[in-house]
Amino acid sequence: MQQIRAQQLAEWLADTSRPGPVLLDVREPWETELCQLPGSQNVPMHLVPTRCDEIDPEQEIVVICHHGGRSMQVAMFLERKGYNTVYNLMGGVEAWAAEVDSNMRRY
């Protein structure tokens, strides 16, 4: 599993020459109602084992949570399941709000 910083992810998403990653948000639905990265897919952490087949293991995946702890656990799980390129968003949506999008709601 690789780590990616919020600013690095923002640059990746802005780079039209590179395919964008799957943005897998593993927070609870009430959390994604407060804020989320555009285009992210919400699969709460406890549902990932039963729903990971919805995610193409050949695509690059960035796993997202509030501060980076849950997403790190899910990223490690996906790697063990054979997913090729998985990143953990360091600092989660909190870091995104602090470093990339100051208009994003924080909680």
Image (spheres, helix red, strand yellow):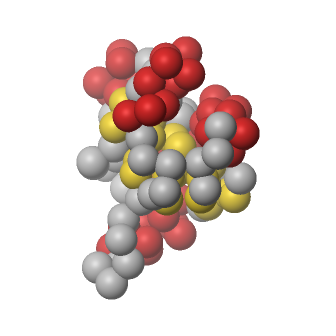
Write the residue at 42% across / 47% down.
56
Q: Is residue 21 left or right of residue 83?
A: left
User: Residue 7 or 106: which is nearer the viewer?
Assistant: 7
Q: Residue 21 appears at what percent x and percent y?
A: 41, 59
Q: Residue 75 appears at what percent x and percent y?
A: 64, 41
Q: Quadrant of residue 4?
A: bottom right
Write the residue at 27% across / 48% down.
39
Q: Is residue 25 visible?
A: yes
Write the residue at 38% across / 78% down.
18
Q: Quadrant of residue 104?
A: top left
User: Residue 12 or 74: which is nearer the viewer?
Assistant: 74
User: Residue 59 or 94: which is nearer the viewer?
Assistant: 59
How many numbered marks are there?
0
Q: Which residue of the protein is positioned furthest toward the bottom in this rendering?
A: 17
Q: Is residue 73 left or right of residue 103?
A: right
Write the residue at 49% across / 18% down.
50
Q: Residue 30 appears at what percent x and percent y?
A: 36, 16
Q: Is residue 27 visible?
A: no
